[in-house]
Image: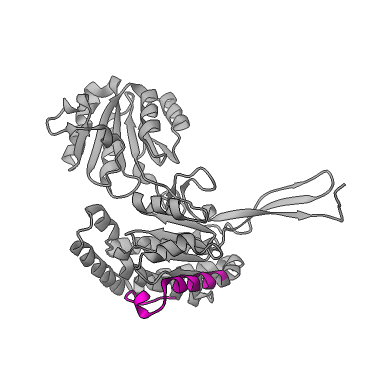
Amino acid sequence: MTADPSQSSATGRPIGDLMRALGVAARAAEPVLAFAPTEQKNRALLAAADALIERRGAILEANERDCREADRHALSAALRDRLRLDQTRLEAVAEGLRAVAALDDPIGTVLAAWRRPNGLLIERRRVPLGVVGVIYESRPNVTADAGALCLKSGNPSILRGGSESLHSNTAIHACLVTGLETAGLPASGIQLVPTADRTAVGHLLADMVEFVDVIVPRGGKGLIARVQNEARVPVIGHLEGICHVYVDAAADLEMAKRIVVNSKMRRTGICGAAETLLVDRRGAATMLGPLVAALLEAGCEVRGDAETLGVDPRVTFASDADWHAEYLDAIIAVRVVDGVDAAIAHIARYGSQHTDSIVTGDPQAAERFLARVDSAIVLHNASTQFADGGEFGMGAEIGISTDKFHARGPVGVEQLTSYKYLVRGTGQVRR
């Protein structure tokens, strides 16, 4: 169900009617996808991956059109980086589809089975969630990732990307539809909202309860907050990624420099980018200066507390707002803390329960940090940029959830499922 991105309510069709039609089509596709054989779903994903490569010229041309519009509207550097596709990134999108195809199919998996004393056999079996609405900004790769993960988990999807990436999303979505049709699955199994009209989001959140079972938002703080405030169906999402790296006194300095610089600078605009560096006071005399210098030399602005200001004149003062900041840019806040417990306390106060890392050679400090930091992802001696479903072996992800109900961390195929109980008897009745 691919549409010209120039089409919207201006065609004379009210947005509410358009969205309702998407919902009706998704519900019709639901039983087909829920019971589709694994081989058929995989065939659709592999055909979509092939189509992405075959049409790469047209996709990159559509993306260039979006990027020119982004420049004209002066979008932030972080949003422009998320938006831009190139040959390498597009190949990675295709590989993501192939990786999802290679995953085990979760649908129908028996999670547990037991027999009661009365002879009833009870089985808990994994099933799809239903129709998944995905609302996202900037990143056109999410069109492929979200569509693929929902398909593999047997869920029809309604995708609403940002207006800034509409041409890119439309071109990628056409490849997904080609995959569905090649495999004999309904094209309405993965639908893209074909308008940039913002009222479409409101309809998806509040007016489609009979058609949408769950919403997954992926984007900035404003989008996530709106979704969580307005949605009348369950939401899987996170508000922001205020990620920390704590460098313990027992850390190897060279390892710490690599991890800190990578955590911040590999890609500054992703939710797993480190925003705050915490340094153990016991090691600050030998480690703080080199860590700050490594960040500055990598092109990162450093804002620090009083002790950090003293190690390099290029450091600027960090206000209280900096400890709460999700910069999504080449800026980091640095603070000296009194050991692992103080680092844990800082993260509990200022963090967003997304991703936090400790660098240390002390196994006891590492285990304490891993156990007591209440975040979706906690790492030891590794970059926060590993907060990614692909890096977790999930093939791809729709996003990183900081929720504590249903799904937490990378949202992949298993996180897009629920379960039901099957109870088999031999004529039992309850007294």
Q: Which residues are magenta?
A: 1-27
Comparing 427 with 198, the one in front is: 198
Q: Position of residue 197 (x, y in %)?
A: 35, 68
Query: What colouring style does the render use?
Result: one colour
Nearest the eye: 193 or 66: 193
Image spot of residue 145 (x, y percent): 42, 60
The residue that appears at 41% across and 78% down in the rendered structure is 13
Magenta stretch contains residue 19: yes
Q: Is residue 116 left or right of residue 382?
A: right
Q: Is residue 381 above or below residue 78?
A: above
The quadrant in which residue 160 appears is: bottom left
- Using the image as rendered, state which of residue 121 and residue 191 is in the foreground: 191
Residue at the spot 39% in from the left edge and 76% down from the top edge: 3
The tally of labels here is 0
Q: Position of residue 50 (x, y in %)?
A: 40, 71
Q: Is residue 392 magenta?
A: no
Residue depicted at 87% across the width and 56% down the height: 427
Q: Is residue 97 visible?
A: no
Given residues 211 and 176, the one toward you in this image is: 211
Q: Can I make out residue 388 in this image?
A: yes
Task: State the residue lying farthest toward the bottom.
Answer: 12
Residue 11 placement: quadrant:
bottom left
Q: Name the image quarter holding the N terminus.
A: bottom left
Q: Residue furthest left?
A: 313
Q: Is residue 361 above or below residue 3?
A: above
Q: In the rendered image of this protein, does residue 306 appear above or below residue 24?
A: above
Question: In the rendered view, does 54 fall on the left or right side of 120?
Answer: left
Does residue 37 appear to the left or right of 386 in the view shown?
right
**Residue 119: % across, % down:** 83, 48
